[in-house]
Amino acid sequence: MSERHARHRDNDRSDPGHAVVVGASMAGLCAARALADTFDEVTVLDRDRPPDGPVPRGGVPQGRHIHVLLPAGALALESLLPGLHEDLVAAGARTVPTERVRACLNGHRLAPAHTGASEVAASRPLVEERVRAHVLDHPSIELREGVEVRGLETDDARRRVVGVRIRERADDPAHEATLTSDLVVDCSGRRSPTPGWLEELGYAAPPLEQLDVDVRYATRHYRLPSDVLGGDRHLLVGPTADGAVGGVLMAIEGDRWVVTLFGMCDTRPPLDPEGFEAFAAHLPVGDLADALHAGEPLDEPTGFRFPADRRHRYERLDAFPAGLLVAGDAVCSFNPIYGQGMSVAALEAVTLRRLLSERGVPDAARWFAEISPTLDTAWDLATTADLALDCVEGPRSLRTRVLNAYAARLHAAAAHDPHLSTTFQRVMGLLDPPTQLVRPGSLVRVLRGTLRRQATRRAAHTDSACGT
């Protein structure tokens, strides 16, 4: 224990405890800050050595590509780390009210949404660097870099996790040490070893749900005129049922715009400059390609692949060792085109802080039950939208087919209905539950929009038949 932590324990607590967080990801950093309100010492272990400044790090392969803090995620992070938003803005991040987010879905440009909330637009390295600085400013939190976690340490009955086995990456590969703790929180990401660790201890691994989407990213940074989108600061061009391609354009720090093009299934955005811009020109809506024509590229395109939505159903396990929790992508990871990852991690950390303040350390059953509503919302939004694409293979229940047929009509109606667009953006920003989209008021607005479009088509057909 560091001298700093020892002083904090002696001065402030009579009953100290030690929590270990595996992974200095966004989920790990947020969890560490939540734990620090209860535990005397929180140690974050990470294989990487964080870079100096807001630059991509090796442990975040998608770090060069577009990220966004959805409105609910921005609010959650600010509640965990007061002053973070002001710090991000001072470092160049943009606060983007939802009315300045241009969403083009199913070929329709949605009406501006006046939700009263904002996104935070910045590069992933800047957000992570500022979050890390705020978290490590807490006197109870320590980051140990270059540490590999090799396994769990348990009591003799294997019913409680009492620490982790670690190896300093600079040490002899055969050398291991034990770091004891009262709680271990696994935030190690999509490659989490917890399912395997559970089986080694005689427990069942959690059931795994997976939806193969094979998302390919190509990202490039541009200098663009400030009025390139008429004052909008974030543009999303989503795919259509028969065209699994899209793109995102967003203003970030450094007077730059980040452009991420994506294709799903067998579609791959080119990584050469000419092919990159040609791909943008064939998106369902021309707004993004028009913007690029007005700009100056600052770098070469870089790629990234995301193979599948994955959710480990820990909440369905009958037995789980005490002293261990799992969070972030280690539980559930979503198609990144929906921008949910950082926000869900922050919302989970807020839940953890609440549970710790109410009854102390939650057991695993309560933890997974408490985060399930947040995960259910994000998972259902992502996988239902993925299954709207013809090329994505997966089970399509009657509910999924009905919801996707309804969503197509909703997007079309929201192009002319600001109230409906606002309702939709609040749901996608994780501010409101998806049930808001099927409340009677929303259903009536979608029906009204559908009837209006049908009447317009009939009038156009009549005019054409009459030769006018």
Image: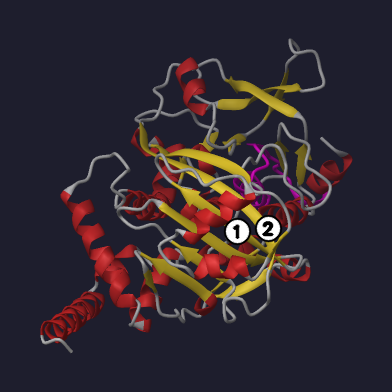
Asked whether 30 falls inside the magenta stretch, the response is yes
Residue 189, placed above or below residue 132: above
In primary-sequence order, the first of circles 2 and 1 is 2
Asked whether 105 falls inside the magenta stretch, the response is no
Residue 442 percent location from the top left of the image: 26, 76
Residue furthest to the top: 174
Q: Amino acid at mark 1?
A: Val
State the count of labels: 2
* Residue on which the image places disc 1: 259
Residue 34, placed above or below residue 116: above
Residue 359, placed above or below residue 227: above
Residue 402 percent location from the top left of the image: 19, 58
Residue at horizontal 32 percent and vertical 70 percent from the top:
411
Asked if residue 431 lies left or right of residue 24, the reply is: left
The image quadrant that residue 445 belongs to is bottom left
Residue at horizontal 57 percent and vertical 48 percent from the top:
218
**Crowding near pointer 2: few (<14 within 10 Å), some, many (20+)?**
many
Q: Secondary structure at mark 1?
A: strand
Q: Amino acid at mark 2?
A: His
Residue at horizontal 71 percent and vertical 34 percent from the top:
45
Asked if residue 96 lies left or right of residue 91, the reply is: left
Residue 437's label in the rendered image is none
Residue furthest to the bottom: 468
- 15 or 78: which is nearer to us? 78
Residue 86 percent location from the top left of the image: 73, 71
